[in-house]
Image (cartoon, coloured by chain):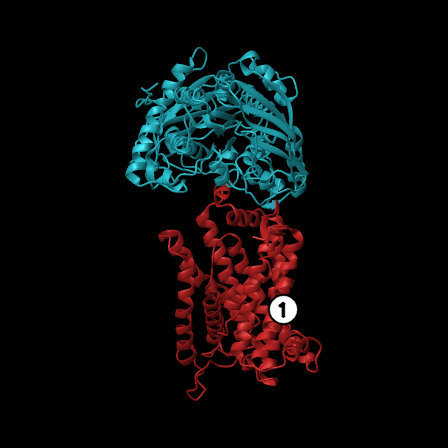
Chain colours: A cyan, B red
């Protein structure tokens, strides 16, 4: 925390895209050895800003200075030469290559493999991120893959390390390890620009925060001195109310609305995780939260519950009736709705309009066809209703899904599923990529469906989601589900252990 | 220099402008080709594109236009459904041949009975023949995951062998003094596909093509099945999420395109061709692939594209007889059309942005 001299100063930077000003006269500065948070809703302009610092995007106007010298990287390699490194939210690693080979691919002049492996080992141990250079990336967990990306950056001895939403794929224990590393780096004088929407993390880690809203800097603060709620409200520009939970009531059903018994299925996804002997049940009005680090069977579980992945009839029961062998539309007719994690390509067709995408899953429950003929009028009206109700920012319902920002599309898709008067709701990553206000709204809608009597399964990597909405909590680990436990009274450590499962986490020994 | 920038949504203007641009570019490049062959390019292009419509013999050639366009449109509309769903039936030529053999075979079996039921039965038989031939790649794909492109294409050559066997063997005219070829349908009124208005070129196949265009348009715009076809082609995983069964879609799309190709063959053999001969297959099944893409896989577009393509056929024939252009040059000309179309197609999803300043 030895804040020293000014490392990077951004002065009046503006970047406009057709129809939107992503950054409007943005200014801020980072000192050496400082962990600086960049906070903002979706579409606030955080990504554009860091892309400019990393040389991926050129500003329309404004200046950047690094070490007091004019800094205008024309491409990422120029930024790296100047000592700026970035860890992206989505990793760019080759699964079929080992760690050292992957690191070498990202370097301009890689040293001989043996030397590189030795350096990877020493750097990774120095910073408490144990990594075996000879292991295949395909065998690594998401947390370990992130280590590869971080170590790749550290080998360049960066002066400024940019991290984009680094904790979204980590268990709480892994987050602790990462933070330790980042603090160590900062203590050595490396500045860190930390992008996140998880306010508690920012409060725990960051020295300074710059808050962006709609492309403009709306405030700066010292995260330790303000509450998460205050930061959220600065970010959103509105007062936030936590979701309200209706008093639980007894629906008087003898059989659970959704019962899964001994569900095992090979993954239909290449490099996927097979489901192994999963059992749970959800009553009407109840929310079951399923946590887990990405790639532990979440996608497969959603497919099995939505009907895209079929198995023996008895593995999935709806009100006692075996339905494990029925397809998605048969289940929709019974009252199921499902929201897969992957929005573009799975939950929505990227090149189709919002109206067509509304039809995609709403045909049956909203009665949008008659003898197979589509009632476009009703479909349009319903799509417009979703847009209005879920505050989807779009020029109109005729816009292609891919033209919407991630958060806006997420809002539309959540609206599409939650406004079908469902009896069983299955959602994977309900608030993925949406801002704090929208996340609060979506969580409230999920709770509302539960109080309407729906049985809800929420699969999420965001513990905030699960702790707010779920009555009971379970975790997926390598395709196995822990027995569900009441959410009330669970500690973060217990949750971390459930998510880590039996094999646990490799804890850093070096400090 | 310039760079390509992805458009947020496909440009409606360029979706329709690209086929026109492709035709224009084909005229330019084709003109160049004809010039290299020592012909006057302006004459050649005029002979191909202008004379059939407004030239001296237009009264006859306009009818020929419909005769050529009918089967092309009929086949292309069927193919376009599959192409939209990502199901590549390349073997329409084979299904066209089998439709002709089945249709003609059923008709000839009833020779010389005169009944007004004969022709409808032949229509059904023709569609069945094409459907049956398309079911082979469909079943192999859904059961054994074979590639429908290869299987349907290979079956074209099998169908051609069966055709020559039919013309010289089991369908040969018993009164034909041993010459290959079946009995001519002009001598079998009940089974003949005549012009509805004499000399107009408007036979039942052309009527069927128009009906198919309308039906396909309604299917794609208003019916959930058409939506599922589009969805499966654009986003296969989203289609499964929407409950579309991939195998059903494969069987259906191949079935429809096969049946329509079979119909086209049946109408052709009983009408313009007149009899089953060894060289009956004239490549409509392959050219229809170009027509389908030229028409943007849209039924109305295909209607126009079929007419344009027919123009190059009729005009091309004129050009080869009047100007002595080799027929291979005409085929190259038609190939260019698809080539240019695929190239300029880029413009509907990308815009060209010229970079100012630094020349890189």
Where does the image place residue A425, in percent across and percent down from the top left? 51, 27
Where does the image place residue A499, in percent across and percent down from the top left? 38, 22
Up-down relation of residue A84 to residue B76 (above or below): above
Please name whichever residue, B139 or B187, is drawn nearer the observer in this view of the structure.
B139
Output the chain of dot 1: B
Q: Based on the displayed image, in which of its 4 quarters is residue B268 positioned?
A: bottom right
- Number of labels in the image equals 1
Q: Quadrant of the C terminus of chain A?
A: top left
Residue position marked by numbered label 1 in the rendering: B308
Is A382 left or right of B191, judged from the image as shown?
right
Q: Residues within 10 Å of mark 1 (few under 14, many from 20)?
A: some
Where does the image place residue A132, in percent across and percent down from the top left? 30, 31
Where does the image place residue A305, in percent across and percent down from the top left? 44, 32
Residue furthest out toward the top = A489
Q: Based on the displayed image, in which of its 4 quarters is residue A186 positioned?
A: top left
Q: Based on the displayed image, in which of its 4 quarters is residue A442 positioned?
A: top right
Please name whichever residue, A431 or B229, is drawn nearer the observer in this view of the structure.
A431
Residue furthest out toward the bottom = B177
Task: Please say whether residue A296 is visible from this viewpoint.
Answer: no
Task: Please say whether residue B29 is visible from this viewpoint.
Answer: yes
Is A472 left or right of B353, judged from the image as shown?
left
Under tag 1, what secondary structure? Answer: helix
């Amino acid at each position: 925390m030895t804040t020293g001299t000014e490392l990077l100063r951004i002065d009046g930077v503006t970047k406009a895209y057709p129809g939107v000003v992503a950054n409007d006269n943005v200014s801020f500065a980072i000192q050496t050895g400082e962990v600086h948070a960049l906070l903002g809703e979706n579409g606030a302009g955080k990504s554009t800003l860091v892309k400019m610092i990393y040389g991926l995007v050129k500003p329309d106007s404004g200046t950047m200075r690094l070490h007091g010298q004019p800094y205008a990287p024309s491409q990422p390699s120029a930024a790296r030469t100047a000592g700026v490194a970035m860890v992206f939210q989505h990793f760019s690693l080759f699964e079929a290559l080992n760690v050292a080979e992957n690191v070498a691919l990202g370097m301009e002049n890689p040293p001989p493999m043996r030397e590189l492996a030795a350096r990877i080992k020493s750097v990774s141990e120095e910073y408490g991120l144990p990594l075996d250079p000879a292991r295949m990336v395909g065998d690594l967990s998401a947390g370990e893959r992130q280590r590869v990306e971080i170590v790749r950056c550290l080998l360049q001895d960066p002066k400024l390390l940019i991290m984009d939403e680094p904790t979204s794929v980590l268990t709480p224990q892994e987050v602790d390890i990462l933070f330790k590393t980042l603090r160590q780096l900062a203590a050595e004088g490396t500045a860190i620009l930390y992008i996140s929407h998880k306010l508690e993390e920012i409060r725990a880690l960051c020295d300074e925060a710059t808050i962006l809203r709609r492309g403009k800097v709306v405030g700066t603060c010292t995260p330790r001195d303000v509450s998460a709620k205050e930061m959220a409200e600065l970010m959103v520009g509105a007062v936030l109310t936590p979701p309200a939970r209706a008093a639980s009531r007894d629906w008087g059903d003898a059989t659970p609305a959704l019962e899964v018994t001994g569900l095992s299925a090979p993954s239909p996804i290449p490099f996927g995780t097979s489901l192994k002997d999963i059992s749970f049940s959800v009553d009407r009005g109840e929310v079951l939260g399923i946590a887990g680090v990405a790639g532990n069977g979440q996608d497969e579980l959603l497919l099995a519950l939505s009907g895209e992945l079929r198995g023996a009839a008895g593995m999935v029961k709806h009100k006692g009736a075996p339905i494990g062998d029925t397809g998605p539309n048969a289940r929709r007719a019974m009252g199921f709705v499902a929201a897969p994690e992957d929005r573009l390509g799975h939950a929505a067709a990227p090149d189709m309009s919002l109206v067509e995408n509304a039809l995609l899953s709403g045909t049956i429950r909203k009665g949008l066809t008659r003898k197979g003929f589509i009632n476009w009028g009703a479909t349009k009206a319903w799509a417009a209703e979703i847009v209005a109700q879920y505050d989807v920012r779009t020029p109109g319902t005729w816009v292609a899904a891919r033209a919407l920002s991630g958060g806006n599309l997420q809002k539309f898709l959540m609206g599409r599923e939650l406004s079908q008067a469902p009896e069983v709701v299955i959602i994977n990553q309900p608030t993925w990529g949406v801002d704090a206000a929208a996340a609060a709204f979506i969580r409230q809608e999920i709770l509302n469906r539960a109080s309407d009597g729906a049985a809800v399964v929420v699969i999420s990597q965001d513990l905030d989601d699960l702790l707010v909405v779920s009555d009971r909590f379970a975790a997926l680990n390598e395709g196995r589900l822990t027995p569900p436990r009441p959410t009330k009274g669970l500690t973060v450590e217990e949750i971390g252990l459930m998510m880590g499962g039996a094999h646990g986490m490799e804890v850093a020994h070096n400090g | 220099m310039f760079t390509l920038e992805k458009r947020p949504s496909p440009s409606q203007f360029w979706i329709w402008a690209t086929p026109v641009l492709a035709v224009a570019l084909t005229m330019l490049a084709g003109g160049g080709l004809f010039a290299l062959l020592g012909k006057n390019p302006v004459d050649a292009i005029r002979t191909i594109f202008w004379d059939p419509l407004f030239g001296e013999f237009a009264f006859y050639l306009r009818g020929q236009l419909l005769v050529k366009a009918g089967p092309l449109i009929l086949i292309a509309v069927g193919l376009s459904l599959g192409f939209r769903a990502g199901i590549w039936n390349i073997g329409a030529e084979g299904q066209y041949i089998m439709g002709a053999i089945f249709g003609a075979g059923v008709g000839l079996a009833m020779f010389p009975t005169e009944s007004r039921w004969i022709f409808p039965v032949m229509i059904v038989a023709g569609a069945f023949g094409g459907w049956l031939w398309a079911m082979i790649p469909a079943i192999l794909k859904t059961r054994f995951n074979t590639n429908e492109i290869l299987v349907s294409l290979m079956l074209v050559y099998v169908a051609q062998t069966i055709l020559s066997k039919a013309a010289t063997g089991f369908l040969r005219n018993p009164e034909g003094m041993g010459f290959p070829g079946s009995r001519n349908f002009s001598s079998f009124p009940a089974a003949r596909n005549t012009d509805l208005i004499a000399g107009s070129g408007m036979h039942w196949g052309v009527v069927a093509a128009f009906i198919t265009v309308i039906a396909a348009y309604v299917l794609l715009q208003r019916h959930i099945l058409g939506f599922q076809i589009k969805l499966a082609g654009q986003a296969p995983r989203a289609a499964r999420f929407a409950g579309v069964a991939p195998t059903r879609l494969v069987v259906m799309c191949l079935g429809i395109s096969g049946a329509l190709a079979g119909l086209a063959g049946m109408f052709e053999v009983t009408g313009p061709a007149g009899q089953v001969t060894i060289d009956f297959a004239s490549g409509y099944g392959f050219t229809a692939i170009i027509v389908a893409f030229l028409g943007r896989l849209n039924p109305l577009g295909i209607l126009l594209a079929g007419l344009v393509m027919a123009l190059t056929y009729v005009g091309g024939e004129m050009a080869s007889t009047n100007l002595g252009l080799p027929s291979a040059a005409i085929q190259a000309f038609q190939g260019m059309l698809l080539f240019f179309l695929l190239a300029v197609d880029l413009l509907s999803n990308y815009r060209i942005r010229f970079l100012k300043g630094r020349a890189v």
